[in-house]
Image: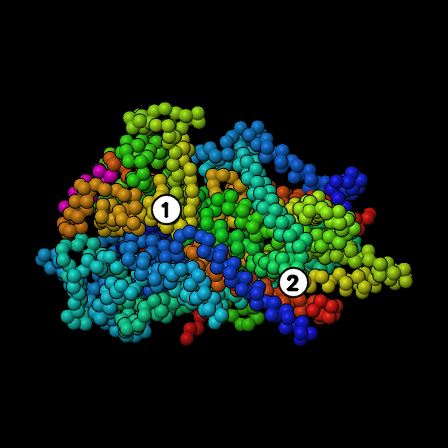
């Protein structure tokens, strides 16, 4: 197990290197300069002021020098200072927003797996029934509806018309004066729509995957054998088939994360949630190079960790992996 | 399982026909194609003609889906938007399939270090939240329809590459490939004559689902203001222009929204139907 | 919403609520005057699309930062409700007989929010740090005109100029920074950019990144304690969401779009809860031509373009009538604005005739005018994130097609807009906006010395007479003299048509009806914010125990 882990972690190094290289390449594809945003919106700007800012930000150095400097800094978890006028360290800006995006996505992930797995199993067990068809349409509806549209419609219905749920943000004004239970209730109400919509949108992929794996397992010989032994259908399905069908689903855990994080741009913009997605969008529009690079690297790194965790879970659940391949 | 086998076709068709969802999806997809080709004959209006004095009119006999914020006919724009949205979907997926197939073939066929190198590259690409990459590139370049299609393609090939590679690995060791190699067939010939046709089925399914994904991605980009640029109508940008008037000019968001919904749904059902019909293990 | 009338000329990216209007702006909707006794308390929540970037104003360029900083800081002078300069941190000032030096007599006993006393040292520091080459600020130009500054004592400050400089007084309206917290430190790394300390009516409370900035009223404010206890600046990036927040009661103040103003906010339910205001904003939107480009070198072509564009239609379609036609760079009703400028009215046949005179006579198969084998086509660029300008561009596109000109539209993200197109001169035409500063000086945008790379006369307008008039206008304090100069400039611009001036949009703020004391004036509605109040019975956010 230790050997497997060591190998698995060592494998991360080239991946990390690749991630930084791609990030750096992507950002430097683009024409235009970040200083423009800061200086050009007003007239009282002279050419020398711009040059001054270029030097201040180190943009006048050749690309490879910029890359090496950046890589070196990053090894120390220093992503440089934001090009935005606030000039804050990128690390600070990201760190204050990661917990929000991450916890929202983890909640959505838990809900997604908690709902999609039973739905998928149900669809598989009752395949070709009305229930199966209904589930199919339902999960695909969630996938097919443009999220921002669904979000606005539900916001209008529950927020403006019915007044049941708050429209946007994470807390009501003055929530810091509430008791812990009321505070939590307030937060929960704010999360219903964004988390609910994120979950609804992601059900399709996982539940369909679950359904097809389940169908595959049910057709395997040992299931037929189990049936032949006269075990009840219930035992066959939930004891034998399910355990084997769930195994590959674990690996999906890691891969669900980038999709959810990517989607957070839309959610956070629409629900005014100050997370990493919103920050990234603003950074990109402003050409805040250090910020964009920082978030790309951190986003990819989080996925890497997610995959690592999923792999470890998988290897613990299935000993063949750590002995066979490792 | 090869596309060139007529027996295969008849079995496939028999299975596919039995799946009503898939048939419905297929019919909708076909209908959309016809609609987008016939656009100029279906509507008397031009999608770009502005009428500043008749903005945001509700649906009427003259304007079946009302008019938009510049007095243009929404029905016309939705019909022409089908062209653009489908174009985005197909070109983007075409690019993804092309890259993915080449990478998958090369990795699977040559194996060893080529394989590990390419697959590490796939791993790296899969680590990025795709939408972040798309956003960064489009916003930093320019939101032209070609860039949009290109970048959706470039960030969406990894799944296809893995599929093709897996398929190649499983086919490579089969007898007929070994036989072909032993009679001196070139690598290119083996790949194109024997391996590619066999890997086509799963790729086709992935492509169908990919078109749906690309249409959704375009609409999300439009929401952020960096999708297909007006006055060219895409479903995404019509829907976005309607989002500010959800309540009182509902027609401006409802129709493009439903168009996206139905199309994406149709492609998914179609893709699933094809997959099920192709799956030799699925017997009814 | 701008607290202070801006003295900085800036590109307008979107419709800012910069305020300023004729005195015939809407009266406050009738409310029963008897019941509403001014009372302290309650909170006003304003919605904003963008988050402030830096609360040290000289380091910021975004309107959100200026919105918030406007509550926290004061300048030496400010614009009053009628757009006249009046004392702020300076109680009074004397201008020397030759007009070359201004002596400010500072208010005594003004305290910074941390309790330190405000003195001339702070003004001196603000001046020095602004012109310091190490400070990355965009606002040093006006202060660079100053030859010498002195602070004879703690309550006197004097600035001396080489030659008379009409915008001088206005330039001292920029925020005074606390020297005792900044002197000798690197201002770019100062914590004050996130936790500012000023002298203004509100003190900084809390900044929750990406969510809100909270300000608390300054009970010791030198003009009196503001009634509204707390001000919250809430960040909501999406306009549709913001409007729903307003309707559900989560916001008290936001700008409306023309469509919202005209079509979505007239229900009895809405008008019972909100008051809408409408007055001309201090901005104008224009179609600017690259005068270096061969297409636009010929004045007749530019005149034809203006004659081909129906400005009235744009105001109807884009602003739903809520704006005025612009004929020049000034706001109707201000003293520099010339009422009867001979602009080119919408007249397609005149446009065709002018084009024919300029040699554009033949048409190709698609109906586009051709000269020397080249079709008349060009691209209009506009900045991303401004729905109104994009709509205007599309209407113009259609009208120009009518006279045989093929127009493409390109919406470009702001940074690349400047670096790829404006700065390199690699553009044909643009739709952009300028703020209209209360002082009518036009030097930065229209003087021929400002046509260099990355300067504001980016269209390359050069006119010797205009240059002279601008110089005369800014080097005299005589308003009649200045007015003559600016009147003449407007005539020249209307003849030359370097821009097709399009419109001056109306500002359309909406405020929750529980706020009383709002009195629209030429400066807009926010100039008397400290006198806004909510009667005790109507207060929503009750005062809670505060440390």
**Residue B116 shown left or right of residue C141 in the figure:** right
Q: Chain of mark 1?
A: C
How are the colours assigned in the image? rainbow
Mark 2 vs 1: CB contact within 8 A: no
- Count of picture labels: 2
Q: Is residue C182 visible?
A: yes
Spatial CA span between label 2 and label 1: 46 Å
Are there few (<14), some (14-19), or many (20+) residues within 10 Å of tag 2? some
Instruction: Determine which of the numbered discs, if any, sits on residue C94 in the image.
Output: none
Q: Residue at x 18, y 60 (%)?
A: C146
Q: Callout 1: helix, strand or loop? A: helix
- For this rendering, which residue is in front, B41 or B180? B180
Instruction: Determine which of the numbered discs, if any, sits on residue C421 in the image.
Output: 1
Location of residue A9 by image quarter: bottom right
- For this rendering, which residue is in front, C462 or C437? C462
Q: Residue at x 73, y 52 (%)?
A: B172
- For this rendering, which residue is in front, C105 or C157? C157
Q: Main secondary structure of the magenta part?
A: helix
Are there few (<14), some (14-19), or many (20+) residues within 10 Å of tag 1? some
Q: Position of residue C485 (x, y in %)?
A: 17, 43
Question: Which residue is under mark 2?
Answer: A253
Location of residue C39 by image quarter: bottom left
**Residue C494 shown left or right of residue C257 in the figure:** left
Q: Chain of mark 2?
A: A
Q: Is residue C241 visible?
A: no
Q: Residue at x 17, y 48 (%)?
A: C471
Q: Is residue B95 above or below residue B75?
A: below
- Quadrant where the image shows the N terminus of chain A: bottom right
Residue C468 is one of the magenta-drawn residues: no
Numbered range of the magenta stretch: C480-493
- For this rendering, which residue is in front, C287 or A219? A219
- Judged by depth in the image, the label closer to the viewer, 2 or 1, is 1
């Amino acid at each position: 197990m230790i050997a497997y882990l060591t190998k698995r972690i060592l494998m991360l190094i080239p991946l990390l290197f690749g991630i930084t290289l791609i990030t750096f390449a992507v950002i430097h594809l683009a024409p235009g300069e970040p200083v423009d945003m800061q200086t050009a919106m007003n007239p009282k700007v002279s050419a020398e002021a711009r040059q001054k800012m270029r030097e201040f930000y180190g943009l006048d150095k050749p690309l490879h020098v910029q890359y090496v400097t950046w890589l070196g800094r990053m090894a120390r978890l220093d992503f440089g200072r934001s090009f935005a006028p606030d000039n804050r360290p990128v690390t600070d800006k990201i760190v204050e927003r990661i917990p929000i995006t991450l916890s929202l996505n983890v909640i959505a992930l838990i809900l997604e797996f908690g709902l999609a797995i039973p739905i998928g199993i149900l669809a598989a067990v009752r395949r070709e029934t009305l229930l199966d068809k209904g589930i199919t349409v339902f999960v695909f509806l969630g996938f097919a509806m443009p999220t921002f549209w669904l979000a606005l419609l539900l916001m209008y219905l529950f927020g403006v018309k019915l007044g049941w749920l708050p429209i946007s943000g994470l807390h009501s004004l003055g929530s810091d004066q509430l008791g812990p239970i009321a505070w939590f209730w307030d937060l929960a109400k704010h999360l219903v729509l964004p988390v609910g919509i994120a979950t609804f949108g992601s059900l399709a992929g996982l539940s369909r995957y679950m359904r097809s794996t389940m169908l595959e397992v049910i057709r395997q010989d040992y299931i037929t054998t189990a049936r032949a032994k006269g075990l009840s259908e219930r035992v066959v399905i939930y004891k034998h088939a399910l355990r084997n069908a769930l195994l590959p689903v674990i690996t999906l855990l890691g891969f669900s994360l980038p999709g959810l994080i990517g989607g957070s741009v839309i959610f956070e913009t629409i629900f005014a949630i100050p997370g990493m997605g919103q920050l990234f969008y603003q950074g990109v529009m402003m050409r805040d190079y250090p910020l964009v690079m920082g978030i790309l690297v951190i986003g990819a790194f989080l996925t890497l960790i997610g995959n690592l965790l999923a792999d470890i879970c998988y290897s613990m659940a299935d000993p063949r992996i750590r002995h066979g391949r490792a | 399982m090869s596309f060139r086998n007529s027996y295969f076709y008849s079995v496939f068709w028999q299975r596919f026909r039995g799946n009503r969802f898939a048939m419905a999806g297929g019919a909708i997809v076909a209908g959309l194609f016809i609609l987008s080709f016939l656009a100029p004959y279906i509507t008397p209006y031009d999608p770009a003609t502005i009428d500043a004095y008749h903005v945001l009119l509700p649906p009427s006999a003259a304007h079946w889906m009302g008019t938009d914020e510049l007095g243009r006919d929404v029905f016309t724009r939705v019909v022409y938007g089908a062209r653009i949205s489908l174009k985005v979907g197909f070109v983007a997926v075409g690019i993804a399939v092309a890259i993915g197939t080449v990478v998958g073939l090369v990795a699977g066929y040559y194996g060893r270090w080529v394989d590990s190198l390419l697959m590490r590259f796939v791993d790296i690409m899969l680590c990025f939240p795709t939408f972040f990459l798309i956003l960064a590139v489009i916003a930093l370049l320019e939101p032209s329809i070609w860039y949009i299609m290109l970048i959706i393609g470039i960030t969406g090939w990894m799944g296809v590459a893995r599929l093709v590679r897996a398929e190649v690995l499983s086919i490579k060791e089969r007898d007929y490939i070994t036989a072909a190699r032993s009679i001196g067939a070139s690598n290119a010939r083996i790949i194109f004559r024997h391996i590619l046709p066999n890997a086509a089925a799963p790729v086709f399914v992935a492509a169908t689902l990919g078109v749906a994904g690309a249409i959704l991605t375009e609409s999300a980009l439009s929401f952020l203001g960096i999708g297909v640029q007006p006055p060219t109508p895409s479903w995404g940008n019509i829907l976005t222009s309607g989002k500010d008037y959800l309540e009182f000019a509902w027609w401006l968001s409802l129709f493009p929204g439903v168009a996206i919904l139905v199309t994406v749904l149709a492609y998914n059902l179609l893709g699933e139907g094809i997959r099920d019909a192709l799956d030799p293990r699925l017997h009814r | 919403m701008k607290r202070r009338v801006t003295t900085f000329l800036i590109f307008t990216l979107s419709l800012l609520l910069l305020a300023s209007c004729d005195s015939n702006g809407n009266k406050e909707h009738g409310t029963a005057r008897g019941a509403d006794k001014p009372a302290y308390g309650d909170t006003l929540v304003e919605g904003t699309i963008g988050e402030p970037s830096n609360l040290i104003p000289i380091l910021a360029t975004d309107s959100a930062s200026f919105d918030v900083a406007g509550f926290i800081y004061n300048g030496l002078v400010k614009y009053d409700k009628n757009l006249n300069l009046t004392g702020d941190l300076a109680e009074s000032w004397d201008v020397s007989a030759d007009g070359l030096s201004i002596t400010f007599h500072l208010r005594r006993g003004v305290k910074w929010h941390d309790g330190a006393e405000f003195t001339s040292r702070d003004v001196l520091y603000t001046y020095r740090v602004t012109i310091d080459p190490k400070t990355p600020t965009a606002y040093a130009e006006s202060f660079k005109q100053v030859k010498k500054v002195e602070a004879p004592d703690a309550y006197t400050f004097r600035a001396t100029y080489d030659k008379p400089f009409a915008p001088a007084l206005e330039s001292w309206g920029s925020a005074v920074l606390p020297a005792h917290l900044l002197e000798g430190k690197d201002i770019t790394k100062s914590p004050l950019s996130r936790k500012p300390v000023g002298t203004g009516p509100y003190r900084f409370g809390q900044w929750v990144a990406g969510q809100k900035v909270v300000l608390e009223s300054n009970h010791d404010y030198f003009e009196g304690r503001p009634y509204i206890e707390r001000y919250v600046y809430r960040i909501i990036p999406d306009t549709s969401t913001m409007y729903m927040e307003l309707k559900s009661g989560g916001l008290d103040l936001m700008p409306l779009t023309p469509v919202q103003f005209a079509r979505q906010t007239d229900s009895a339910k809405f008008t019972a809860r909100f008051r809408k205001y409408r007055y001309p904003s201090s901005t104008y939107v224009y179609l600017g031509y690259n005068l270096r480009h061969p297409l636009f070198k010929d004045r007749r072509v530019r005149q034809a373009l203006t004659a081909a564009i129906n400005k009235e239609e744009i105001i109807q379609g884009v602003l739903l009538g809520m704006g005025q036609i612009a004929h020049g760079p000034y706001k109707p009703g201000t003293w520099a604005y010339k009422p009867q400028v001979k602009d080119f009215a919408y007249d397609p046949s005149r446009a065709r005739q002018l084009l024919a005179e300029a040699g554009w006579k033949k048409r190709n198969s698609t109906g586009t005018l051709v000269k020397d084998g080249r079709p008349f086509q060009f691209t209009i660029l506009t900045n991303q994130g401004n729905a109104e300008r994009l709509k205007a561009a599309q209407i113009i596109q259609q009208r120009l097609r009518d006279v045989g000109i093929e127009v493409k539209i390109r919406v470009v993200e702001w940074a690349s807009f400047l670096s790829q197109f404006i700065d390199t001169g690699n553009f044909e035409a643009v739709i952009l906006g300028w703020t209209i500063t209360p002082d009518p000086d036009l030097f930065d945008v229209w003087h021929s010395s400002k046509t260099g790379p990355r300067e504001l006369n980016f269209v390359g307008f050069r006119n010797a007479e205009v240059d002279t008039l601008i110089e005369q206008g800014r080097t005299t304090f005589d308003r009649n003299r200045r007015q003559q100069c600016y009147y003449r400039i407007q005539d020249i611009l209307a003849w030359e048509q370097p821009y097709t001036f399009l419109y001056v949009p109306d500002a359309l703020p909406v405020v929750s009806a529980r706020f009383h004391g709002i009195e629209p004036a030429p400066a807009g509605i926010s100039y008397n914010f400290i006198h806004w109040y909510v009667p005790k019975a109507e207060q929503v956010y009750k005062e809670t125990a505060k440390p």
